[in-house]
Image: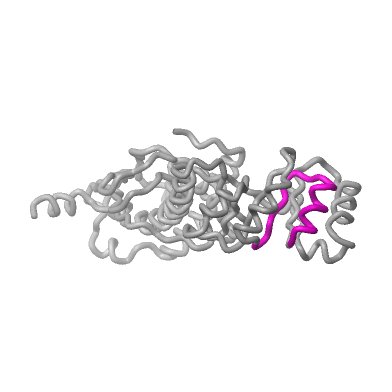
Amino acid sequence: MSISVPYLDPMRKTVFQLAAMAFQEDMPEGDITVEALQLERFPCKGYVKTRESLVMAGVAWGDQVVEAFRALHPEAQLKLHFNVEDGQPVDPGATLCTVEAPADEVLAFERTFLNFLSRSLGIAKQTATLVGMLEQARVGTRVLDTRKTQPGYRLFDKYSVRCGGGWNHRLNLSDQVLIKENHIAKHDGVAEVLRFVKRNLKRPVPIIIEVQNFDECRAAIEEGCDVIMLDNFSPEQVREACTSKPNTIEFEVSGGITSQNILEYCHAGIDRISIGAITHSVKAPDITLLVEEELNRDHSH
């Protein structure tokens, strides 16, 4: 299952840069423990395993973490092989990937790589949980991310959302117009600000406007735009707003959406739900890297 995104190459470049900084941060003068134990003499194979159900996210950028390690250690023999494709469900106990190298390299690589993988898998799982709820309820509402991403990890986080079956909102401030309350405050209401934007927009991009009440929603419908964002509307208010929704405009809801109330919003007729928590409140999954000796000990018990 291949996850197609237009930002794959810049995302991979970002991961290389972040990983290079992370390895330098973790080993400014090498790993003193493995040096003292002379572990470079021992060949090693490590297995990254999960103890919980997951959705895979990491194949598209994993080799960039390896390349960043090699950039700091040109003689490194490290090899990384994935057993699961991005976007594919994973059962507890499964091996996500294997790492082969002398033991000192595996141990130096382990923590930084797992830090990246844990974040990506955590985002994908949170997204997939919500997407799965909507699919089971047979509603057509899409789950979108926001710009509430880890600084520097924007493309990484958004790719992880795609692995979980979610959709990306705007990538940055440059690719869509999103008129919010603070923008409207500088103009004379929703209708005036939409007219002003359309007159002054230098290139054709989607126009989204955030509205606070029914009057603003009606004004936005009359002026026309691509998406109307119903900010902090209750499910009942969303249902009422959707009764006048034209086919040419999508309605989105944001603010206060949780797994407990998301289905109420979907049944109210909304097209899209944007949820910042899927990227800003990431829960690391229970994954670990075990070398062959540890696995053998586990099996012998």
Report x, y in % for residue 261. 51, 58
Would residue 197 be visible to someone looking at this image? Answer: yes
144 relative to 231 in the view: left or right: left
Horizontal and vertical percent position of residue 86:
43, 40
Instruction: Residue at 68% x, 52% y: name it.
Output: 172
Left/right placement of residue 107 relative to residue 70 reads left
From the image, which quarter does the C terminus lie in?
A: bottom left
For the point 47% across and 57% down, which residue is it? 259
Tell me: 278 left or right of 76. right
Residue drawn at (74%, 41%) of the image: 246
Residue 26 percent location from the top left of the image: 42, 64
Q: 82 or 142: which is nearer to us?
A: 142
In magenta, the rendered stretch is 213-232
Asked if 106 appears above or below 36 in the picture, the reply is above
Residue 9, image x and y in percent? 58, 40
How are the residues colored? one colour
Q: Nearer the viewer, residue 122 or 96?
A: 122
